[in-house]
Image: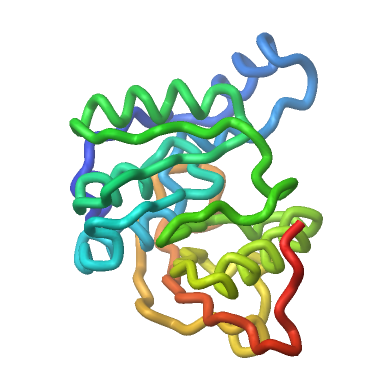
């Protein structure tokens, strides 16, 4: 079990050795190995789905920026009809496969930047811990809003990172507030408050155009 989420996951204990190892493969300045850790937003969203399996049961689900696949695996085990986990990190695919096998979950993997495309035709779109840097945040919100505008249920998990938009102006409805123990040395504190939101469809006047 990973801090209240009933899963078995392959996780790293320290970031520095892993970062150096990925640098040896990918070259200088590799991306942060998000796939090797259970992040606060994903933990909160995973807990929410385990407590509310009806959100995904029998539905087509996409987990955007999946990392190690925690949220995607929870959705699969909660009875989703089909789950795809999307990430651009080449190591994330292997991490999702390992973690999926460890839990007997069936999760497909998509390794391309979905922000370059219109939102996919799914019933539920999950997005945890996607507001950690400005350029990504500027792309994520309109993309998620476009998904919500076409009828997709959009669920977001985040611990209040710097680039998370104002909830009211962005249409983020609070579903659950949780305190989670992070399993990484990358947060500035061990106990983190994280929130699960539902993204309301934007009004017709502000509906963004899919890319």
Residue drawn 60% across and 14% down? 21
Give the answer, above or below, for where 26 lies relative to 100: above
Q: Is residue 186 left or right of residue 49?
A: right
Residue drawn 72% across and 26% down? 30
Furthest-top residue in this view:
24
Name the foreground residue: 87 vs 124.
124
Q: Position of residue 43 (x, y in %)?
A: 37, 55
Name the foreground residue: 161 vs 61.
61
Quarter of the image where the C terminus is located = bottom right
Give the answer, above or below, for where 81 lies relative to 150: above
Q: Position of residue 61 (x, y in %)?
A: 39, 52
Q: Is residue 123 visible?
A: yes
Residue drawn 63% across and 71% down? 145
Q: Position of residue 46 (x, y in %)?
A: 32, 56
Res. 55 image quadrant: bottom left
Q: Is residue 74 visible?
A: no
Q: Is residue 34 left or right of residue 40?
A: right
Q: How many marks?
A: 0
Name the foreground residue: 156 vs 132.
156
Q: Position of residue 183 (x, y in %)?
A: 39, 44
Give the answer, above or below, for where 149 lies relative to 205: above
Q: Is residue 187 left or right of residue 137?
A: left
Res. 206 image quadrant: bottom right
Quarter of the image where the N terminus is located = top left
Give the answer, above or below, for where 107 lies relative to 98: below
Q: Is residue 29 left or right of residue 84?
A: right
């Amino acid at each position: 079990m990973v801090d209240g989420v009933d899963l078995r996951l392959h996780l790293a204990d320290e970031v520095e050795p892993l970062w150096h190892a990925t640098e040896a493969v990918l070259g200088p300045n590799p991306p942060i190995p998000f796939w090797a850790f259970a992040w606060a937003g994903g933990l909160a969203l995973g807990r929410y789905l385990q407590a509310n399996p009806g959100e995904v049961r029998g539905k087509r689900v996409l987990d955007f920026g999946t990392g190690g696949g925690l949220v995607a695996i929870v959705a699969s085990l909660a009875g989703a009809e089909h789950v795809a986990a999307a990430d651009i990190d080449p190591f994330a695919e292997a991490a999702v496969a390992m973690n999926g096998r460890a839990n007997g979950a069936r999760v497909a993997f998509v390794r391309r930047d979905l922000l370059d495309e219109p939102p996919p035709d799914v019933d539920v779109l999950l997005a945890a811990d996607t507001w950690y840097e400005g350029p990504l945040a500027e792309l994520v919100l309109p993309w998620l809003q476009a998904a919500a505008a076409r009828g997709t249920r959009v669920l977001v998990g985040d611990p209040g990172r710097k680039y998370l938009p104002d909830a009211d102006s962005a249409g983020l409805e609070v579903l659950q507030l949780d305190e989670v123990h992070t399993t990484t040395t990358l947060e500035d504190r061990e106990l983190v408050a994280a929130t699960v939101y539902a993204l309301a469809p934007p009004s017709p006047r502000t509906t963004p155009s899919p890319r």
